[in-house]
Amino acid sequence: MLTIHKADHNGKILVTYSGWLIDDRDEIIVLARWQRPPITLPYVTFAEGDFLIETFYRTRHYNIFALYGGGDVPASVD
């Protein structure tokens, strides 16, 4: 288990959550379960129980993620 801290462009922490390290050879790939209250952004809503697969790059200033509804992931991931 690891802790992910999301920061804005000034380095201010906006949100913190836990996840599991999947791979860290070239990129860092993390599986996380959203266990916080829902957050609605203009383009997506993070609901409690949703899963994220996130890729963090060592040489880039951004990450990408896939968001899955909590019921869309096999129970064996729980």
Image (cartoon, helix red, strand yellow):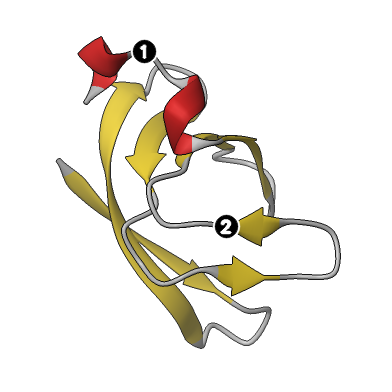
The image shows residue 69 at horizontal and vertical percentages of 54, 36
Q: Quadrant of the N terminus?
A: top left
Between discs 2 and 1, the one toward the N terminus? 2
| Residue bearing the label numbered 1 | 74
Q: Quadrant of the C terminus?
A: top left
Tell me the residue at 39%/33% (across/down): 30
Residue nearer the viewer, 40 or 15: 40
| Residue bearing the label numbered 2 | 46
Q: Which mark is residue 35?
A: none
Q: What kind of element bears circle 2? A: strand
Tell me the residue at 38%/47% (across/down): 49
The quarter of the displayed image where residue 17 is located: bottom left
Tell me the residue at 51%/68% (across/down): 38
- Tell me if mark 2 has few (under 14), some (14-19) or many (20+) residues whose alpha carbon lies within 10 angstroms of its own: some
Question: Residue 70 vs residue 44: left or right?
Answer: left
- Image mark count: 2
Amino acid of disc 2: Phe
Tell me the residue at 50%/81% (across/down): 14
The image shows residue 56 at horizontal and vertical percentages of 54, 40
Vertical placement of 1 versus 41: above or below?
Answer: above
Amino acid of disc 1: Pro
Residue nearer the viewer, 12 or 19: 19
The image shows residue 34 at horizontal and vertical percentages of 39, 52
